[in-house]
Amino acid sequence: MPARPQGDVTRGTTAPNRLRRVDRWITWRCAAALRAASEPLVVDLGFGGSPVTTLELHARLVRLRPDVRVVGVEIDPERVTAASAYSRPGLSFVRGGFELPVNGRPVVVRAMNVLRQYDEAQVAPAWGQLLGRLAPDGVLIDGTCDEIGRRATWVTASTAGPESLSFSAHLASLDRPSQLAERLPKALIHRNVPGEPIHDLLALLDEHWARTAPYSSFGPSQRWRAMVESASDAWDIARQPARWQLGELTVPWASVAPSSPLAG
């Protein structure tokens, strides 16, 4: 008898284009690995009550690698049955959890809005399990976004562990960078308190956002870019001007990791 999938059924809420920001990152960050892979396997873990964002992920990645294989994984068998009606070459759906019941080792595992619904103590074991299934040059993307995909953050991790934290926002609707705190990954959501690095970073970004207010006359993208440039003097921020223009910024995980180890 097959083992029970590892994990819990989540709320499953989703919407078209909700994950466009992280998908845009994946098609940039993972392009070389996908093109070089002998087996371009991508897993969408916890696709939810509708497979729409899995279909969108496949459509975006097939432009990079026509033979990409995207597998949507869900614990709820009814969701899998409903999603299977949308299967096509290169796109399929299976029942499963953190054990990732797929053939092969994924180059990318996208796990958006999944661990957000777990306890913080469950994050490290889940990461360990998922990272153990990756291809040697594969990555795990674990993050959270709002209901319509205007604000998102995610951790990018390799087989060696977490590497970076990225922020992405619809800048025209952002009053200040610290509003992204509501969408921090589970590993950090409870750490946005004085004394923790993530709290210090968000406070720093707010400070420099205020300082660069005059750039607003040139548009929110120019203000965001000026803020990142300014804040880079005080924090290690990846120098990616083209990504800044999109309302993104990325910092090393080591600079924001919890001041005490995650429970696990």
Image (tube, rainbow, N blue to C red):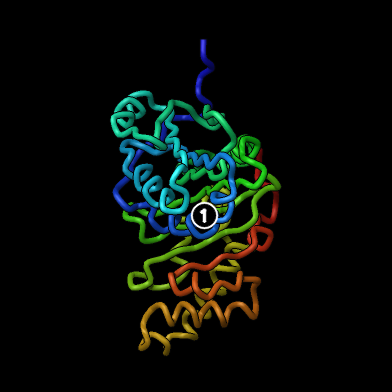
Dot 1: few (<14), some (14–19), or many (≥20) neighbours within 10 Å? many
Residue 55 sits in quarter: top left
Q: Residue at x 35, y 52 (%)?
A: 18
The answer to whether any part of residue 160 appears in the image is yes
Instruction: Name the side, left or right, on which 17 lies relative to 163.
Output: left
Percent of width and height locating residue 250? 56, 65
Q: Is residue 194 left or right of residue 5?
A: right
- Nearer to me, 14 or 190: 14
Q: Residue at x 58, y 78 (%)?
A: 231
- Residue at the (57%, 82%) spot, across then down: 230
Marks counted in the figure total: 1
Residue 121 visible in the displayed image? no
Where disc 1 sits, the SS reads: strand
Question: Residue type at mark 1?
Answer: Trp
Question: Residue 126 versus residue 199: which sits nearer the camera?
Answer: 126
Q: Is residue 105 above or below residue 208?
A: above
In terms of depth relative to the viewer, which is nearer, 3 or 36?
36
Would residue 174 be found to the left or right of residue 35 on screen?
left
Q: Which residue lies furthest to the top in this view?
A: 1
**Which residue matches tag 1?**
154
Q: Is residue 153 above or below residue 136?
A: below
Place of residue 244 in the rendered image (x, y in percent of width and height, measured from the top left): 49, 73
- What residue is shown at x 69% (from left), y 56% (from top)? 259
Residue 264 pos. (x, y %): 66, 38
Left or right: 15 in relation to 91: left
- Which x, y percent locates residue 196? 63, 61
